[in-house]
Image: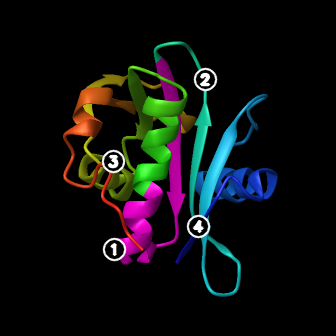
């Protein structure tokens, strides 16, 4: 896995949207990603719904690609540096479908806290889980600002 940041954003967003099963594309977004040795996307973080206090973030990944420690930590810090230091948001929000157990586990590993459920808010009346990560929680995360070569 190789972190490529904001390169190939349009392509990354389309890949992530297909992987997540989202039908409409956002009017404004940023997309940060990582690719494999062939240049194919393996991890994409989509940022949208920007406000002064919050940025929504959605994650799409191929299975097994978040296990490369150096690149995972590099991407983690790039994502949250963008949200909390560059954009100066107070929080990040991740919305995860009730049946997406992998994503629920993933955002929890990143430090997001489960905050509630929006009933029948997702496709086919599926509940949508709300997860939040505050700036202080990021700064205190074990991976925060770890330098990798």
Q: CA distance from mark 2 to mark 3?
A: 18 Å
Q: CA distance from mark 3 to mark 4?
A: 17 Å
Q: In the rendered view, does 32 fall on the left or right side of 10?
A: left
**The one of 36 and 121 positioned closer to us in this rendering:** 36
Q: In the rendered view, does 53 fall on the left or right side of 48?
A: left
Indicate yes or no whether the magenta region holds residue 65: yes
Which labelled disc corresponds to residue 69?
A: 1
Q: Is residue 7 visible?
A: yes
- Give the residues in magenta: 54-75
Q: Residue furthest top?
A: 52
Q: Residue at x 47, y 20 (%)?
A: 54
Residue underneath mark 4: 34
Q: CA distance from mark 3 to mark 1?
A: 16 Å
The quadrant in which residue 37 appears is bottom right
Q: CA distance from mark 2 to mark 4?
A: 22 Å
Earlier in the chain: of badge 3 and badge 1, it is: 1
Residue underneath mark 2: 49
Q: Position of residue 103 (x, y in %)?
A: 38, 53
Q: Secondary structure at mark 2?
A: loop
Q: Position of residue 34 (x, y in %)?
A: 58, 67
Q: Nearer the viewer, mark 2 or mark 4?
A: 4
Residue underneath mark 3: 107
């Amino acid at each position: 896995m190789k972190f490529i940041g904001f390169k190939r954003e349009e392509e990354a967003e389309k890949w992530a949207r297909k992987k997540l099963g989202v039908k409409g594309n956002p009017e404004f977004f940023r997309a940060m990603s990582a690719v494999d040795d062939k240049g194919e996307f393996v991890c994409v973080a989509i940022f949208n719904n920007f406000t002064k206090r919050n940025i929504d973030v959605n994650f799409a990944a191929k299975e097994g690609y978040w296990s490369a420690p150096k690149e995972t930590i590099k991407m983690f810090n790039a994502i949250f540096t963008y949200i909390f230091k560059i954009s100066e948001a107070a929080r990040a929000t991740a919305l995860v479908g009730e049946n997406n157990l992998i994503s629920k586990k993933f955002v929890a590993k990143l430090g997001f806290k489960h905050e509630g459920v929006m009933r029948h808010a997702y496709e086919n009346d599926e509940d949508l889980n709300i997860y939040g990560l505050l700036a202080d929680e990021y700064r205190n995360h074990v991976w925060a600002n770890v330098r990798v070569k």
